[in-house]
Structures are given as C-alpha cells and as structure tokens.
Amino acid sequence: MTATILDGNALAQKLRADFKTRAEALAAKGTRPGLAVILVGEDPASAVYVRNKVAGCEKASFHSEKIVYPTDVAQDVVLAKIAELNADPKIHGILVQLPLPKHFDSDLVLEAIAPEKDVDGFHAENVGALMQGQPRFIPCTPYGVTKFFEEAGVNLKGAEAVVIGRSNIVGKPMAMLLLAQSCTVTVCHSQSKDLAFHTRRADILVAAVGRPRMIGPDWVKPGATVIDVGINRVDDPAAPKGYRVVGDVAFDEVAPKCRAITPVPGGVGPMTITMLLANTLEAAERSAK
C-alpha cells in the first residue's frame, strides 16, 4: 500500500492564498483583518511561534500587533491591555501566547478575551459552542486537521476514530469535531489500558500525546488515516542543530500501512498558524456584517 502523504506546507499555501484574496476584498470595503498577539516572557519557542504568526499576518495582508512584556509583568497590566484590545475596532482577533509565567492565572487571562475575538477558541463560551455543535471558533490545530480530511476526501461518516491525548487545545476539541462528522470516537490518554488495542481498531488515528515515535506499525490498522500532531525533539549529533524534530508516530515504519499520513515536520504544524489566520479572517468578516 502506498500512503498519501498529507503535505501541510502545500495545503497551508493554498489556503493562505485564498485568505489573502478575501482579506484584500474586505479591506477594499473598509475592514482590514487585525490580529493582536501578546507574548509574556522570553521563552525561545514562544518567541518563534509569535514571530511566525505575525509574519503570516503580513503575508496575508492582515493588520497585526505584537505586544511583548517582561516575565515579571503584573497580571493586571496584561488584563488591562486585553480590555483595551477588546474595545479596539481594528483588532478582530486576540491571542495570548501560552504558556504564561507561573504567577499568572492562565484561565483568568483567557476568559478576559472577548469571545468574539477569541481566535484560539479557548474561551469557555466558545468551548461550549463547539460542544453544542455550533462553533464560533474552532481551536486552530484541530481545525487544521479537518482541512486534511477535506483535502484527502476522507469519508468520516461511521468511521472508528481514536484520539490519543485529552488536552483542551487538541484532544478534546478534536474528539468533538469527529463526533460532529458521525465518527465513533474513542479518546485515549496516559492512563488508558492496552492502548494498542484501541489504536488497531482505528480507521482514523490522531496522535497528540507528546512521546517521540510511540506509535509503531503494530499499533496501526491497515488502510488507516494517521494524523500526527506530536512535535518532539530527539538528540541527533549528526543533525545541524544537534537534534531532529519527530512526531508521535514512527513515520517510516507506519506509512506503508496507511491510506494517508501526515509527516513531521511539514504536516500539522504549518496548518496551525494557517487556521489562526482563518479564524481571524472569519472574525473580521462577521464584524464587517
């Protein structure tokens, strides 16, 4: 069996070209999509993510604002800035880069974002709307995964779907989206017994557990569609940076068994920022109406 490799870079480029066209048309009518990103502290990975988000906005003809605070900034300062952005008509999406420093109450900060500008989809109101099958914003990584299914023509109706991971960012919303497409969904996690028993039944397998190459070929059903959300660094002295980035799935060994599979890197990763742009554009279009 020859697996279809689901190329996140190619799909992201295709979608972003459409977003740019829509954004320019919206701007011609007086509304330019605007995203504000708040970064607290100097975490290198967070800084890279924020830089990529701002760059994505610029390429898609969006307005963007990056607000950076030192690690020791008071939480009230950040909350006051969020309130200011909530009232700013130029800003349609607000994102607070996680994780926040330990002296922050992350839930309180996320809840301070106006639900109609919560383009990460983390506000309780938006989580509830997703649960009811009427999402305002879909969390970006699961949203990107749904685009892979659409692009590859995967028939989800009645499929056995297994999601490994129960985070609020990926696992839980992914399960809700699969349920909405009439899948039979099993959510597994670190306390699940005989994990391989569940994964071998999966027509759709989404791995978001954060363990490098945990999913081997013996865990995968022939003909399955495998989505690897994991991003893990493993030491490799031969690599230019001394490490390589791998997923939760042993790609080379698993791919021959699959109908379709995402690589790491170059799979789900590029789609996450792409769907952040999608949510921001959708927010701007709603505002314009």
Image (spheres, helix red, strand yellow):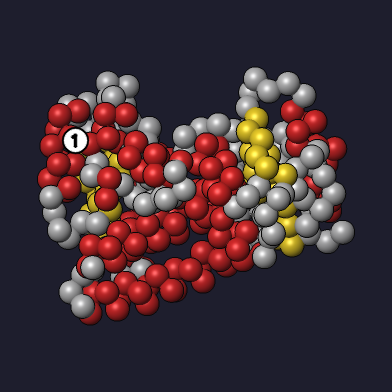
Picture layout, residue 275 above or below residue 67: below
**159 left or right of 278?**
right
**Residue 270 screen position, x and y as percent:** 51, 56
**Residue 229 screen position, x and y as percent:** 59, 44
**6 left or right of 269?**
right
Query: Which residue occupies the foreground of this view, 198 or 231?
Result: 198
**Amino acid type at mark 1:** Val
Picture layout, residue 59 above or below residue 273: below
Element at label 1: helix
> Which residue is labeled 1 in the image?
78
**151 left or right of 112?**
right
Q: In the image, what residue occupies the spot 83% across and 61% down? A: 2
Residue 155 seen in the figure = yes
- Name the image quarter holding residue 184: top right
Query: Which residue occupies the foreground of this view, 102 or 234?
Result: 102
Query: Which residue occupies the foreground of this view, 69 or 114?
Result: 114
- Name the image quarter holding residue 18: bottom left
Q: In the image, what residue occupies the spot 63% across and 50% down? A: 182
Residue 33 seen in the figure = no
Q: Quadrant of the C terminus?
A: bottom left
**Residue 144 screen position, x and y as percent:** 52, 55
Q: In the image, what residue occupies the spot 69% across and 59% down? A: 155
Query: Which residue occupies the foreground of this view, 47 or 24?
Result: 24
Query: Dot 1 surroundings within 10 Å: few (below 14), some, or many (20 or more)?
Result: many
Q: In the image, what residue occupies the spot 22% across and 79% down? A: 28
**Residue 271 screen position, x and y as percent:** 51, 56
- Name the image quarter holding residue 124: top left
